[in-house]
C-alpha cells in the first residue's frame, strides 16, 4: 500500500502526463481553427499556460526527487493524437472541440484540487501552492469557455447555413 508521499508522486506524474496530453490537443485544435479568431487566440494563450504548468510540475517532481513518467507521457500524447484525428471528420469540429475542451478543463480542475489536498497532507506546501495556482488557471479557461459557448455556437450555426466547411473550422 502506497503512503501519502508515494501517492502524491504518482498523481504528480499523472498530472504531468495530463498536461502533455492537453498541450497536444490544444496545439492540434489551434492549428485547425480558421474562422473563430477569439477562440483561437484564447486557446493559444492556454497553450502557453499549459507549457508553464508542465514546467512547474516538473519542478515539483524534481524537488521531490522524482521524475515524470515517460510511459504515462507517451500514453497521454497518443490519446491526444487520436482525439485530434477523430475531430477532423466531424462536421461540427469547432463545437465538438469546445465541448471536449470544457470537459477536459474540469477534469484538470478536479485533478489539481486533489493534488493540492494531497500535497498539504504530505506536508509539501510548495507543491500545494503550485497546484492551487495551476487550478486557478484551469478555472479561468473553463470559465472563458463557459461564457463563450453560446456565441461560438451561434456563430457556428450562422456559418453552417452559408458554408458548412467554413463553419467546421
Image: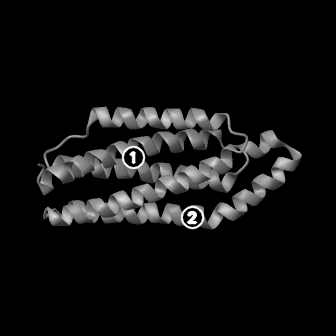
Check the image and report above or below for 151 versus 12.
Answer: below
Residue that protrudes farthest toward the front in the picture = 1
Check the image and report above or below for 10 versus 149.
Answer: above
The residue lying at 61 percent from left, 39 percent from top is 31
Q: Which residue is mark 2?
A: 144
In the rendering, at what x and y percent does residue 26 appear?
A: 52, 45
Callout 1 crowding tier (Cα within 10 Å): few <14, some 14–19, many ≥20: many
Quarter of the C terminus within the rendering: top right
Check the image and report above or below for 28 versus 97.
Answer: above
**SS class of the residue under badge 2?**
helix
Q: CA distance from mark 2 to mark 1?
A: 19 Å
The residue lying at 68 percent from left, 39 percent from top is 90
Q: Is residue 94 left or right of residue 121?
A: right
Residue that protrudes farthest toward the right in the picture = 162
Q: Is residue 113 left or right of residue 149?
A: left
| Mark 2 or 1, nearer chain start | 1
In the rendering, at what x and y percent does residue 102 appear?
A: 54, 57
* Nearer to me, 132 or 37: 132
**SS class of the residue under badge 1?**
helix
Q: Is residue 15 left or right of residue 25?
A: left
Disc ID at residue 19: 1
The residue lying at 43 percent from left, 56 percent from top is 107
Callout 2 crowding tier (Cα within 10 Å): few <14, some 14–19, many ≥20: some
* Nearer to me, 9 or 30: 9
In the rendering, at what x and y percent does residue 24 appear?
A: 48, 39
The residue lying at 61 percent from left, 52 percent from top is 98
Q: Is residue 121 left or right of residue 86?
A: left
In the rendering, at what x and y percent does residue 137 appear?
A: 43, 62
Check the image and report above or below for 109 versus 15.
Answer: below
Amino acid at each position: 500500500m502506497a503512503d501519502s508521499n508515494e501517492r502524491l508522486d504518482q498523481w504528480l506524474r499523472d498530472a504531468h502526463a495530463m498536461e502533455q496530453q492537453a498541450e497536444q490537443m490544444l496545439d492540434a485544435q489551434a492549428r485547425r481553427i480558421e474562422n473563430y479568431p477569439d477562440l483561437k487566440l484564447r486557446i493559444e494563450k492556454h497553450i502557453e499556460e499549459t507549457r508553464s504548468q508542465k514546467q512547474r510540475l516538473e519542478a515539483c517532481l524534481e524537488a521531490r526527487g522524482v521524475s515524470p513518467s515517460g510511459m504515462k507521457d507517451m500514453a497521454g500524447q497518443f490519446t491526444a493524437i487520436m482525439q485530434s484525428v477523430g475531430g477532423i471528420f466531424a462536421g461540427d469540429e469547432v463545437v465538438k472541440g469546445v465541448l471536449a475542451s470544457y470537459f477536459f478543463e474540469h477534469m484538470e480542475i478536479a485533478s489539481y484540487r486533489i493534488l493540492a489536498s494531497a500535497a498539504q497532507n504530505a506536508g509539501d506546501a510548495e507543491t500545494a501552492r503550485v497546484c492551487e495556482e495551476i487550478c486557478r488557471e484551469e478555472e479561468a479557461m473553463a470559465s472563458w469557455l463557459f461564457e463563450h459557448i453560446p456565441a461560438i455556437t451561434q456563430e457556428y450555426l450562422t456559418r453552417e447555413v452559408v458554408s458548412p466547411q467554413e463553419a467546421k473550422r
